[in-house]
Amino acid sequence: MKIRDILDSKRTLSFEYFPPRDEAAVQSVFDTIESLARYGPDFIDVTYGAGGSTQALTVEMAVRARRETGLNVMAHITCSAQTKEAIHAVLTRLEDAGIENLIALRGDPPADQSSFVPVQGGFAHATDLILHTKKNFQFGVAAACYPESHPESPDFETDMKYTRLKVALGAEFLITQLFYDNDDFYAFMDRAATAGIDVPIIPGLMPILSSSQIRRITQLCGASIPPGLDRLLGEHADDRRAVRQVGIEHTTKQARDLLDNGVAGLHFYVLNQSYSMTKILDDLRATGHLSRLS
């Protein structure tokens, strides 16, 4: 089912997974997918690795998840390290496997490059990928957006210009980059409304599992850590279990507030771990918030 059709009738719950570097660990990811399936996600998605490093495994996992779990799977497609012809072949395989939705991204540069450079014969921007997909396939297409602006964008205005272009070219809904201050999301929503963007925008939340990990992730993606949260992470930096609990409590508060304010859904970057997500979702169920997504 097309995700946009679901969004027309309800608010969505979704989970994002990533392919492990070791193919032998793939089953553990599927164990997590099965564990969280009991919460009734409207869709799940499987990411590409940095620089497109897990392209083949990503496609295999997406196809397998669709076949074995029956869940609605959204595929990630990026421009990284692929020619237009290679991307077209991937899209054909996904379509043949019954996958109806994808999120079109430019992708990050490979680890040995400081900036994104398309391969010869490849797409340079997510907008190019969206346009190609809409012209040649019947997928429901999502795109990314950035509450604190894309890290390569010089200002909010430029960032919103390209977000609006993604929608104009066929993106049917948007999923945000992670953020830890809901006010950043609400400010983005105001800018999007002013820019005339009227597609659903789903906030993306990532539970914190370790202090060092989240500092590295936020530095890479341009997200910020609010002072109060930053202080708690510093106080418990050497206690992974305490940091995980801080993350659970913070993400739960974010989710409650977002649902109270009528967001289109919740998209969780689960980092292939079920413990924190189970605690968060059970809390949301106990307070009645989870039922707002059913």
Image: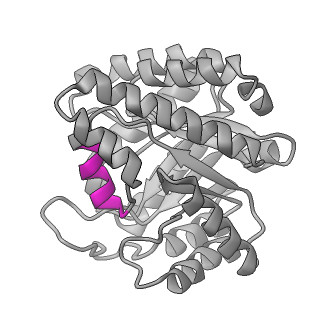
Q: Quadrant of the N terminus?
A: top right
Q: Is residue 219 magenta?
A: yes
**Residue 255 appears at what percent x and percent y?**
61, 38
> Magenta stretch containing residue 182, yes or no?
no
Could you tell me residue 193's position as x and y percent? 74, 73
Closest to the observer, 236 or 35: 236
Residue 52 image point, x, y percent: 30, 54
Residue at 54% across, 25% down: 280
In front: 206, or 229? Answer: 229
* Res. 210 image quadrant: top left
Residue 190: where, in percent of width, then height?
A: 70, 71
Whether 106 is drawn above or below 278: the answer is: below
Q: Quadrant of the C terminus?
A: top right
Q: Mark yes or no: residue 54 visible.
A: yes
The region drawn magenta spans: 213-222
Asked whether the viewer can see residue 48, the reply is no
Query: Which residue, as the protein is rendered here, is positioned at the far right?
Result: 9
Q: Residue at x 51, y 37 (%)?
A: 251
Would residue 278 appear left or right of 203 to someone viewing this image? left
Question: With respect to residue 60, does 83 lie above or below?
Answer: below
- Magenta-highlighted stretch: main secondary structure? helix
